[in-house]
Image (spheres, helix red, strand yellow):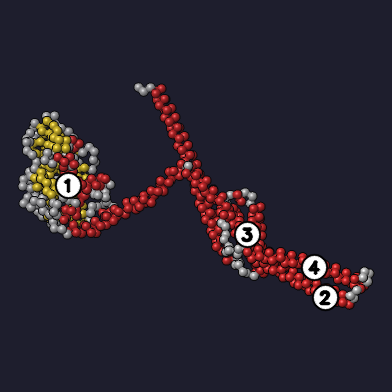
């Protein structure tokens, strides 16, 4: 009697283990969900960042390519340079105003590299950076052109003033000379009008010479300034510096690098990376797996099968009689009846006979019968006996006439029939359908093998070997839902999957299956077996529903079935 304590303990243990399993599953699901959410967020952010970086780089390259065409060249008139300076300065102020409004209206979004506001502000900053470089260049051009012109203007003005002062000094000298001639003595007598006039002229001369000296100094100074301007290097073409724009893009690049590091440490990424690497190969393998059988079966049906069907028929033993008896008659003519197969086949053994049978089909044994084990059906064909399943047979030898029943305890669709191969006759049989044999004690059943490597039809149908059972022989065979033995006098065809055997005197050939799709979906074999002549053939009522024999039937099992077909088993 089972202990209640042990039952209760087992019940509690199962509950605790179930609870632990549920907790583990929930925690695992929670962990995987969090990892997947993190991975999906980072992947989305990386996609947006790559997109934004590409757009900012596109803005940088576009502005850097278009701006030089808007910048005047060296030698442009000063008025045009001044107009372009005003235009660029106005454009920069407008963009700065737009940027300032975006910056003030979006205090949070302006710092997020994955936000459209950040993208818009960064794009404006890049444009302003290049426009300021262009404005500075135009200012340099204007300064380079306006400096010498202003120096020349100032130089000419002082030179014109010097010439005027020189002329005034000359006139003053002349006036003094004239005064000295008009009043040769009086201009030297103090307090006289001539004296005072002479002193005035002398003071004026002194002031004019002082002004002349100042003009000479200014002329020298401006000549030096003009010389310096003339010695300055000529401005080269506009060369834009991308470092400012790159600094604006730098936050996006840094965010990308940071996310890459996070993705590198992601458990989900470590799992997805090898999956992504092998996914294309896996898809190609899947496509080949899906379409290769269709292609091979199409080639087999439309190319190989018609050629095999046109090959001449094969006759293994034309001199044999072709008579096979059943329990109530023989099937060597059209009119002979055949005994229906049975789920349970009764057999009568006497003291001169023995039965070799597979143990799984032996329902019971008489008490006065002797039994032992025969390891192989035929020691001359050990490998074929093992592959056909005809090994470890039970040999039954009764002491008197006894009844034995053959039946299957595992296959509900199996039915059995006794085939009595007459002396002088031979039956080509697939050993896989053989259950057992009845024979006189001490005699050995004659079994021969016939190879056909030189036949093109054998290569096309992959049937190279035929196993022939020679009479006299009593063979117990099984078939799915029954075994039928029919004459082939007028010519008959049977689905190749249902064929069990045929007499060796018949003309044997193959015919292509009626429809391609029934062959492709495994409903029928590629070939139907065809016979003609004075003999009979044996077939199951229906092919075994679990049988998908053939190279493309059941993977490895299909390859094994094809090998067994090659060796006639």
Q: Position of residue 543 (x, y in %)?
A: 22, 48
Q: Nearer the viewer, mark 2 or mark 1?
A: 2
Spatial separation of the CA atoms under disc 4 and disc 3: 50 Å
Task: For mark 3, give the secondary structure.
Answer: helix
Give the label on residue 132, or none.
3
Label 2: few (<14), some or many (≥20) within 10 Å? few
Question: Residue 107 vs residue 455: left or right?
Answer: right
Task: For mark 4, give the secondary structure.
Answer: helix
Among the 4 quarters of the image, the one containing residue 326? top left
Spatial separation of the CA atoms under disc 1 and disc 3: 90 Å
Name the quarter where the N terminus is drawn.
top left
Task: For mark 1, give the secondary structure.
Answer: loop
**Mark toward the start of the polypeptide (4 vs 3):** 3
| Label 4 with label 3: CB-CB less than 8 Å | no
Give the label on residue 209, or none.
4
| Residue 86 seen anywhere in this rendered image of the structure | no
**Mark toward the start of the polypeptide (2 vs 1):** 2
Q: Position of residue 277 (x, y in %)?
A: 40, 48
| Residue 61 seen anywhere in this rendered image of the structure | yes
Q: Is residue 537 above or below residue 30?
A: below
Q: Nearer the viewer, residue 531 or 116?
A: 116
Q: Residue at x 78, y 68 (%)?
A: 212
Question: Residue 331 vs residue 519: left or right?
Answer: left
Label 1: few (<14), some or many (≥20) within 10 Å? some
State the residue position of label 2.
174
Q: Position of residue 545 (x, y in %)?
A: 26, 46
């Amino acid at each position: 009697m089972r202990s209640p304590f042990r039952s209760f303990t087992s019940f509690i243990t199962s509950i605790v283990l179930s609870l632990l399993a549920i907790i583990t599953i929930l925690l695992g699901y929670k962990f995987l969900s969090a990892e997947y959410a993190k991975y999906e967020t980072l992947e989305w952010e990386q996609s947006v960042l790559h997109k934004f970086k590409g757009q900012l780089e596109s803005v940088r390259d576009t502005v850097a390519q278009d701006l030089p065409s808007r910048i005047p060249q060296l030698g442009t008139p000063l008025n045009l340079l001044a107009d372009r300076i005003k235009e660029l300065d106005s454009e920069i102020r407008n963009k700065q105003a737009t940027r300032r409004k975006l910056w003030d209206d979006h205090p949070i979004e302006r710092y997020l590299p994955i936000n459209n506001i950040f993208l818009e502000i960064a794009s404006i900053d890049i444009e302003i950076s290049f426009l300021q470089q262009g404005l500075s260049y135009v200012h340099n051009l204007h300064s380079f052109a306006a400096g010498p012109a202003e120096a020349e203007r100032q130089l000419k003005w002082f030179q014109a003033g010097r010439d005027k002062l020189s002329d005034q000094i000359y006139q003053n000298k002349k006036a003094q000379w004239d005064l000295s001639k008009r009043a040769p003595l009086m201009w030297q007598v103090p307090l006289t009008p001539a004296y005072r006039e002479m002193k005035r002229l002398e003071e004026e001369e002194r002031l004019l010479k002082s002004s002349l000296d100042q003009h000479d100094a200014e002329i020298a100074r401006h000549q030096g300034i003009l010389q310096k301007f003339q010695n300055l290097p000529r401005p080269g073409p506009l060369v834009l510096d991308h470092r400012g724009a790159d600094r604006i893009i730098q936050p996006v690049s840094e965010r990308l690098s940071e996310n890459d590091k996070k993705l590198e440490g992601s458990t989900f990424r470590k799992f997805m990376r090898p999956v992504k690497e092998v996914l294309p190969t896996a898809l190609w393998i899947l496509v080949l797996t899906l379409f290769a059988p269709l292609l091979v079966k199409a080639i087999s049906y439309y190319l190989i099968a018609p050629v095999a069907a046109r090959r001449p028929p094969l006759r293994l033993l034309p001199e044999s009689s072709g008579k096979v008896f059943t329990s109530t008659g023989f099937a060597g003519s059209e009119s002979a009846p055949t005994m229906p197969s049975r789920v349970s086949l009764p057999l009568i053994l006497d003291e001169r006979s023995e039965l070799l049978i597979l143990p799984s089909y032996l329902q019971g044994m008489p008490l006065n019968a002797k039994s032992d084990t025969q390891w192989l059906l035929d020691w001359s064909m050990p490998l074929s006996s093992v592959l056909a399943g005809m090994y470890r047979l039970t040999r039954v030898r009764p002491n008197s006439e006894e009844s034995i029943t053959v039946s299957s305890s595992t296959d509900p669709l199996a039915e059995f029939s006794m085939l009595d191969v007459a002396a002088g006759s031979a039956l080509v049989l697939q050993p896989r359908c053989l259950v057992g044999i009845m024979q006189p004690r001490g005699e050995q059943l004659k079994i021969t093998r016939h190879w056909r490597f030189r036949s093109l039809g054998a290569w096309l149908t992959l049937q190279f070997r035929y196993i022939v059972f020679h009479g006299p022989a009593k063979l117990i065979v099984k078939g799915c839902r029954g075994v039928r033995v029919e004459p082939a006098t007028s010519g008959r065809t049977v689905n190749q999957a249902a064929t069990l055997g045929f007499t060796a005197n018949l003309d044997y050939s193959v015919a292509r299956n009626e429809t391609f799709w029934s062959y492709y979906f495994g409903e029928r074999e590629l070939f139907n077996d065809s016979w003609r002549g004075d003999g009979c053939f044996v077939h199951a009522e229906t092919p075994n529903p679990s049988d998908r024999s053939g190279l493309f039937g059941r993977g490895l099992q299909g390859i094994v079935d094809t090998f067994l077909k090659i060796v006639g088993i």
